[in-house]
Image: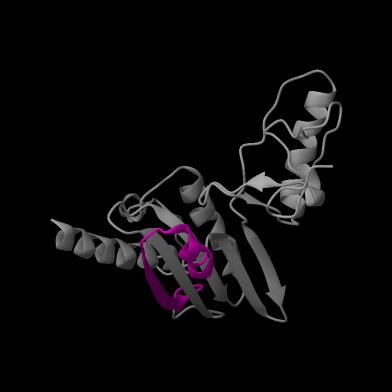
């Protein structure tokens, strides 16, 4: 079996290995990271299910491809929620990319609403272009699933400047008027714009 650089089984976008008649999917198989362009091996049920579906379609005579991953994940430790998508600063460093980062503290609900709890969001964008590269979230109830907004934005190649005016939902039990996601991308967009001016 051919093992790729990530330690997983090397496959093409149809989940086929270099060996005739051999296919692989799930925790044992590599996937393309859509930000770094590098092969990765993430052990996540979401990835395994999608790869398995693609693999099954192809084995059954159909045609399907698996585009890649962002490593989007959420977890909970006691009453603290954590989430990530894209790349962290430690993962970006070896790639030779230049980036800007911003971190903001806010609340999961309107500050005056019962149950409002702290949330911290860190976002990373490519310097000059402002392309969103990654995000991490930590907070109490209602924090982690906000990562899906960032995952969708990265998947579609959005810049943080394009995210500033996203029409996200609002009601005091769910979010401040300015959702923490929007506060974070606005702050990062301003940083990117400032550094862009330094290059002109």
Farthest residue in the top direction?
61
Q: Is residue 178 visible?
A: no
Q: Is residue 198 left or right of residue 178?
A: left
- Tell how many labels: 0
The correct choice, above or below, for 11 with respect to 151 in the image is above
Q: Is residue 113 visible?
A: yes
Point out residue 3 in the picture as x, y percentages from the top left corner: 77, 47
Task: State yes or no: residue 176 in magenta.
Answer: no
Q: Quadrant of residue 43?
A: bottom right
- Tell me the magenta residue range: 88-110
Task: State yes or no: residue 108 in magenta.
Answer: yes
Quadrant containing the N terminus is: top right
Q: Is residue 182 left or right of residue 61?
A: left
The residue sitting at 77% across, 52% down in the picture is 45
Point out residue 186 in the picture as x, y percentages from the top left corner: 31, 63
- Judging from the image, the colouring scheme is one colour
Q: Quadrant of residue 123?
A: bottom left
The residue sitting at 70% across, 26% down in the picture is 64
Point out residue 172 in the picture as x, y percentages from the top left corner: 47, 69
The residue sitting at 17% across, 58% down in the picture is 199
């Amino acid at each position: 079996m051919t093992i790729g650089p990530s330690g997983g089984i090397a496959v093409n976008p149809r989940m086929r290995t270099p060996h005739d008649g051999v296919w692989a999917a799930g925790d044992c198989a590599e996937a393309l990271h859509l930000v770094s362009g590098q092969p990765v091996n993430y052990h996540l049920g979401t990835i395994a299910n999608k790869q398995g579906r693609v693999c099954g379609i192809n084995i059954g005579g159909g045609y399907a491809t698996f585009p890649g991953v962002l490593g989007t994940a959420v977890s909970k430790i006691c009453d603290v929620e954590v989430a990530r998508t894209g790349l962290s600063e430690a993962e970006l460093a070896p790639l030779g990319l230049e980036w800007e980062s911003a971190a903001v503290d806010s609340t999961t609900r309107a500050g005056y609403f019962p149950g409002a709890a702290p949330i911290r969001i860190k976002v990373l964008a490519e310097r000059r272009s402002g392309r969103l590269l990654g995000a991490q979230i930590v907070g109490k109830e209602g924090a982690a699933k906000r990562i899906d907004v960032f995952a969708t934005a990265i998947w579609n190649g959005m810049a943080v400047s394009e995210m500033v005016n996203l029409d996200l939902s609002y009601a005091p039990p769910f979010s401040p008027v300015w959702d923490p996601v929007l506060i974070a991308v606005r702050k990062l967009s301003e940083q990117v714009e400032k550094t862009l001016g330094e290059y002109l």
